[in-house]
Amino acid sequence: MANDANTSSQKPSVTEVKAYLIGLQQAICKRLEALDGKAEFKADTWERAEGGGGESRVLTGGKVFEQAGVNFSHVAGAAMPASATAHRPELAGRSFEAMGVSLVIHPNNPYIPTTHANVRFFIAEKEGADPVWWFGGGFDLTPYYPFEEDVVSWHQSAFDLCKPFGDEVYPKYKKWCDDYFFLPHRGETRGVGGLFFDDLNEHGFEKSFEFMRAVGNGFIEAYQPIVERNKELDYQDEQRQFQLYRRGRYVEFNLVYDRGTLFGLQTGGRTESILMSMPPLVRWEYGFTPEEGSEEAELYERYLKPQDWLGLEAS
């Protein structure tokens, strides 16, 4: 399933994509509330002066989730920012619409991984020309105290949802995720990866939309079992402090490297919604080095480097 950001002759349905995304936001929030068993999402609807708006849903102070944000946005504009047209000259002079669901979940328990997911659709149009459009998205996992069972099941879920679209899809988008969620200044991945794709349109609107839905629907199916396995595990303040320290990597990546954050801020997006991915509590520590042979050291030595979690390369 190749990806190419050139135009496609099959006309995309903005209305159909938007309806799916709104339903996805509702479905994920419902599942997360049931998992938490205490807190509920509060909805915050907003409008954007330049065009469009969205609804941010945030859960705080839960039994399982310290904070979870699930955001739907649909923004529009008369022109793309200069940073976008410099890399994509075919977008110059076009109006645009961008819509998506983006979420980040920060659990209380350090043995439950933080996770991020998003699915999105972009279309740019001008009179007398075919639209330029594509889908993007993915999901990734950021554990603090990883269990190999969780990492393997996460990647198995990603593999299974990709399989109907071709044998090359999972390896390609898994590698893209490993490469994208990498902190060069730390020399480590943000977590254990998952899937990342962008500029997807080559197989036409219906097939591309089908894959985006598979990723959107597959996220909660991959994450829920991990939460259920780990939510009752005991932890001490030592594990909590390490979790807060490692959350700093999340902040560093999102503010320095994440393209979605940059696009949202450059296009006049709603700052509160863009930055809802930030953890509610975080800390930095100068010169931290994990103790040799500790659980914390295992994270660095075993998990924060790209690898073949499913043994596909050996088969």
Image: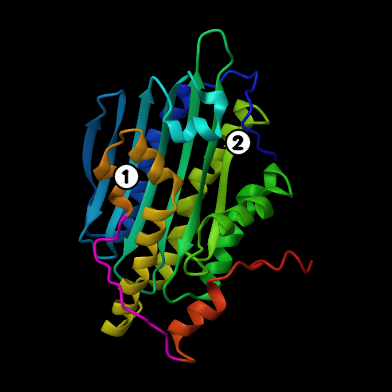
Q: Quadrant of the C terminus?
A: bottom right
Q: Residue furthest bottom?
A: 292
Q: Residue furthest top?
A: 128
Q: Which residues are magenta?
A: 278-291
Check disc 2 and report its element: helix, strand or loop: strand
Q: Which residue is mark 2?
A: 200
Q: Tell me residue 275's x, y (percent).
A: 30, 49
Q: Tell me residue 252's x, y (percent).
A: 38, 61
Residue at 47 percent of width and 66 percent of height: 185
Could you classify mark 1 by the number of other residues whose Cα lies within 10 Å: few (under 14), some (14-19), or many (20 or more)?
some
Inspect the magenta stretch and tell me whether residue 279 lies in it: yes
Q: Is residue 41 left or right of residue 296?
A: left
Q: Is residue 182 left or right of residue 264?
A: right
Q: Is residue 236 left or right of residue 290?
A: left
Image height of 197 relative to 84, above or below: below
Q: Tell me residue 104's x, y (percent).
A: 36, 54
Check disc 1 and report its element: helix, strand or loop: helix
Inspect the magenta stretch and tell me whether residue 200 lies in it: no
Of the residues shown, which amino acid type is indicated by label 1?
Answer: Ile
Q: Which residue is mark 1?
A: 274
Residue at 56 percent of width and 53 percent of height: 195
Image height of 128 relative to 56, above or below: above
Instruction: Identify which residue, 203 or 161, lies in the foreground.
Output: 203
Q: How many discs mark residues in the rendered view?
A: 2
